[in-house]
Every structure is written in C-alpha cells, then in structure tokens.
Image (cartoon, rainbow, N blue to C red):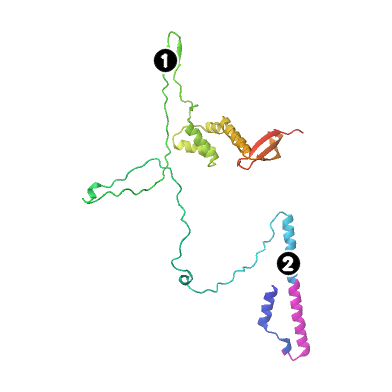
Amino acid sequence: MSSSEIARTLETIDIRPDEIHDEQLSEAFRIFLQLIEELSENNEKLKEENQKLRDEISLMKGEQPKPDIKPSGKKPNSDISSEKERKPKNTPKNKKSKTKKPKIKIDRVEVCEVDKDILPDDAEFKGYQDVVVQEIIIKTDNIMYKKEIYYSPSQKKTYMGKTPDEIEGEFGPGVKSTVCMLKHVTNVSEPKIHEFMHNFDIHIAPSTISRILTKNNELFHQEKLDIFLAGLRSTDYQQMDDTCSRVHSQNHYALESFATHITPLILQLRERIV
C-alpha cells in the first residue's frame, strides 16, 4: 500500500486525537499516526532503492530495465463548445491534393463502343472517358527453331543455321531472368520456383534451377564491379573496414568498402596469414 492509499484509509477512519478526552489514549493515537507516516515513507524509499537495484541487475544481464512511464501531462479540454462552433466555416484549403496513382505504362488501348441501336437520332459524340485497368499476362513462349542444313558434296562439308546469340541451352533468357527474379527479388525458395515453372508447363529440373542461380554469373559480378568503381569515382573519400571470416574451414579477412553513393556492400575475401 502506498503513502497516498494509507492517507486515504486513515481519512475514512476519521480519528481525531485532539477530541479524545483521555490524555493517555489521545497521546497513544498521536504516536501511532506518526509511526504509520514514518513507516510508509521508509517503505516508499525502500521500494525505490529495490527497483534501482533490480534495474542494475537487469542491465548487467543484458535485459531491459523497468520503463520510466511518466504520468500524462495532458490537460483536460475546457472548451466544451460543439465542433461546428469551434471550426470556422468556408476554410480555404491550401493543401494540394496528391495524385493517388503513379504514372502507369499503357501497353494497348481498346475502345468501348456504344451500341448504335440504343442511341437516339440527335445523339452527338462528345469524346471518351479514360479508365486504366492494370493487368499481367504469364504464358509460355516456347519456340521451335528449325535450323536449315545444307551439304556440299564438292567440299564434303555440312552447313547449318545458328540460333540467336541470346539462346544458350534449352531455356531462353525469359526463363532464366524469371528464376533469378523469383529468387533474389521475391525471396522464393528453389522448390517453390520449380513448382511455379511446373504450373506454367515449363519442364525444368530442380538441378537446372540451381545451376541458373549459381553458375555462369560472371556478367553479374562484372556489373557489380562497374557499380562499385563508379561509386568510388563519384566521391572524394571512401571508408573501409575488415573483419575475420571462415571460408572452407580456413581463416580469411572480409574487407568491406563503403562510399556515399554506393548502396551495396562490397565484400572481398583475403586469406589470413597466421
């Protein structure tokens, strides 16, 4: 029980030692009340010291101490007038309205014609009302390349047509870029990528998905290096740091480079010399 609660309890009892005619009893009540007041103050001090010790122990353990929640200092609203009386009428709006939709790329336009049979004879054309609907199409684009073959008896040599330069293997750049997007942009697991491709009749093995994500990534490494070098050239200073790292059970240093205009963190591993 806090000091305020003890005071309220004593007020309800309404003991007045001055009105007691027995002097010994009156003095006893006065002493008892003083003792209660002193004990309650000492109890509050002990509670505060105990809480401070608990907070220090929590900090030593790495835990959070008890939050210091202060009482609300908000004053009650003395204005009891109605909302209509307090809010002025015809307040000018200086705030500009923000556009709700960003600029959307239009891929095709379709005209929704009015049935001419329902139009009266005096109907006049007044233009169009634009309605933008966003849509996405995911479908296969499987291509069978028929490579021409010619044979020269005089040279005893066969000539064959070539597929486009971007075609490597059994899967086109669209499939490979979709695999990389699902993994690195949307954080989809490889089994779920395989399930996604299977649902759209793309017959690809899980091992092929893994090779697309882990093999022949020199182009991405070169692009990362170009971004890093461009960021270094755009700033007057750079920051570097290193930390220990383990690679294949070997000790290495991980070198971290930072620049003002570079968001990616470039890591370079160097073998640690012991």
Query: What residue is drawn where x is 74% and y is 71%?
Result: 43
C-beta proximity under 8 Å, tags 1 and 2: no
Q: Nearer the viewer, residue 217 or 196?
A: 217
Q: Position of residue 193 (x, y in %)?
A: 51, 38
Which picture quadrant has residue 107?
Answer: top left
The 10 Å Cα crowd at callout 2, few under 14, some 14 to 19, many 20 or more, is few
Q: Which residue is mark 1?
A: 150
Q: Nearer the viewer, residue 4 or 150?
A: 150
Can you say which quadrant of the picture contains the C terminus?
top right
Which picture quadrant has residue 160?
Answer: top left
Q: In the shown orientation, is residue 189 left or right of residue 271?
A: left
Magenta span of residues: 19-42
Residue 80 part of the magenta-drawn span: no
Spot the residue most to the left: 121
- Type of residue at label 2? Glu
What's the magenta bit mostly, secondary-structure-wise? helix
Camera-side mark, 1 or 2: 1
- Type of residue at label 1? Tyr
Question: Is label 2 in a helix, a strand or a loop?
Answer: helix
Quote the CA–CA distance across marks 1 and 2: 97 Å
Can you say which quadrant of the picture contains the N terminus?
bottom right
The 10 Å Cα crowd at callout 1, few under 14, some 14 to 19, many 20 or more, is few
Residue 48 — which label? Answer: 2
Q: Is residue 118 above or below residue 212?
A: below
